[in-house]
Image (cartoon, grey):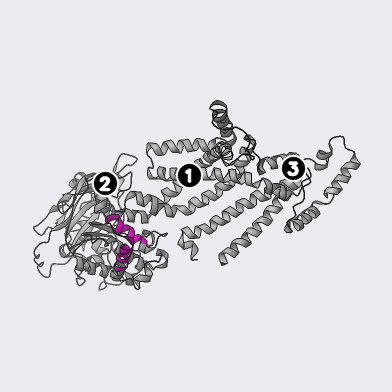
Amino acid sequence: MDRLLRQLSQLAITVFGIVTVTFFLVRMIPGDPAQYMLGDYATEEALATLRAQLGLDQPVYVQYGLYVLRAVTGDFGSSVVTGRPALEEILFSLPDSAILAFAGLAVAVAIGIPLGILTAERQGSWSDMLIMIVALFGISFPVFWLGLASVLLFSQELKWFPALGASSGGGVLTHLHHLVLPAGVLGISVAAYITRLTRSAMLEVLGQDCIRVARAMGVPERRVVWRLALKNALVPILAIVGVTFAWSLGSAILIEVVFSRPGIGSMILKAVSARDYQLVQAGVLVLAVAVVLVNSLLDLAYGLVDPRLSTR
Amino acid sequence: MPNHPMPNLHPVAPAAPIAPATAPRPVALELRDLTTVFPGDDGPVTVIDGVSLAVRAGGTLAVVGESGSGKSMTFLSALGLVATPGRVRRGEVRIDGTDILHQPPERLRRLRGAVISMIFQDPLTALNPVFTIGEQIVEVLRAHQRIGRAAARARAIDLLARVQIPDPVRRVDDYPHQLSGGQRQRVLIAMAIALSPRILIADEPTTALDVTVQAQILDLLADLQAETGMALVLITHDLGLVAKYADDVAVMYAGRLVETGSMEEVFTRPRHPYTRALFRSIPRLDGPVDEELPAIEGQPPNVARLPPGCAFEPRCTVGRGRADCCTRRPLPLAGDRSGHRSACFHEDLPDRKEAAR
């Protein structure tokens, strides 16, 4: 319980930090929202009126204070483009991005962790080296390049999967069909990273005394690796998954653009070019909170894996 | 493991004739010409060089030598546990007359833990931190036997009781970090003897423990040995423990065996200049208080760059610079019928320092 409280207060501090950083970050985007909304031929008068309306005529620290005060009550302002509450807009498109990010992460975990263990088991063999080289390529290729290449191959040439959209209107099967390519591309690029880090976590554990003891007592190698060593490596592996979740959310934004999928990513992109401060702020905040939440949950999970962390 | 009174650790004229050996028990474990190499920058480095040893059933062999002399590596080699890229290049490991080293890996795996078992120096790292001690004992049982979960757990509790862990029914679900160092070593002993092996190798089992616990652990091993008649190999650099518990002694230097014999023989008449120097470097309670302890001159050897002749030659007060010591390798040959052997060309010559006194 104590642990949970500490976790929650940490969460609150982190969220406050994120609110502050995004506020100032967004104001560093060059350009004037009023100018953008009214066009190049707007009169000075009209611009001033709109700025006053948006509260942009006040000093930055007043804007910041007002923003934080409203944020505490859950009011993140309204989109200057659609006029609807920014948080509502973002939360509306959150499920699309979340599905993509989690599907990608699931693919990455399903490929990366077993491959990492297998390569650690066979360290120095030709299969280990081959997989590590492929993984290095996977990390080096930008995700949008992989996305474009896969669209060319699987949609244009082979016509296996649709290239664009998420088919939100269709049934579950059509939806899944649309998800295969983007989630696959996202998963493979993240899997490369998970493979390498799982391998090094396993190698470290396999070199430990307790593993030598298990071997000296005749425990079969398969059980030594997949049970005794793996549970030890699980804490670093979970930490890796937490880090890659942030990364796959970031990559999901790029993937949404490449595959023209709806989601927070494409929404933030449009909001940035429209200087829609409130929407960008709310979008970045939601993404950041998602990352923090997932990592807090993982922190709690460590205690289940490693008894030394839970009894403290 | 006989509990001898502490004999004089210094070479003196034998006060009494060595007691005649009782009917010799069968040899439980025999190493023949065991040689292990690791790849090095200038070709393979021989870390274990032609080691031949034997331990009798119910007997205790102490293996002594400084750190890095290959004591542990010898027995890791015997168990087929040399970490890659190292490998056993030649030799045999015989248990009851059958060589186990050239068996398929699966057969060797079945022998490990069941017939020949090993405990290690540091009980703090030797137990798996994320499993309960019960789970770890059960893992060993189930590696060798078809046994149900409940039965295995009951066996684990029995074993914990046998190594004198208090309240084993409750302790079986503890994690290693909830136990003291001495208790952890007891748990490791419980794992090692779970399948009543005929040979137990104890690699400095008490080095990481404090002195009072040391005696408890060694007495536990002695009791278990008396009950089961297993052969015990005690790897140590504590000559006091050797005197108290060992029947036979093997002295190693730079991956080679330099002297073997019964404990009484080696302690009363050490032959190899290295063994003699080792004994001289021990403080004695009845010696002059202000006398400086003689240390062995020079640096411990680098096994990658050993001299072509005797490995001890550069530090030896007898053989340093002698033509034969510099060019030829002495082999551990029997000097007499007692089985006391030493690998030295000049074991009959006195140490130069001693001669000067």
Return the residue found at the far top: A157
- Residue B142, position as x, y percentages in the image: 30, 57
Specify start and end residues of the magenta stretch as a single range.
Answer: B135-158
Is B203 positioned to the left or the right of A235 in the image?
A: left
Give the chain of mark 2.
B
Q: Amino acid at mark 2?
A: Pro
* Label 2, residues with CA under 10 Å away: few <14, some 14-19, many ≥20: few
Q: Chain of mark 1?
A: A
Per the picture, the main secondary structure of the magenta-coloured stretch is helix
Q: Are labels 3 and 1 assigned to the same chain?
A: yes
Q: Position of residue A215 (x, y in %)?
A: 32, 53
Give the left or right position of residue B245, taking residue A33 as reference. left
The x, y position of residue B291, in whole percent, is 29, 68
Q: Which label is found at residue B105?
A: 2
Label 1 sits on residue = A110
Chain bearing tag 3 is A
Between label 3 and label 1, give the one nearer the viewer: 1
Other-residue count near label 3 (Cα within 10 Å), few / some / many at <14 / 14–19 / ≥20: few
Q: Are marks 3 and 2 in contact (CB under 8 Å)?
A: no
Count of number-bearing discs: 3
Residue at 48 percent of width and 54 percent of height? A235
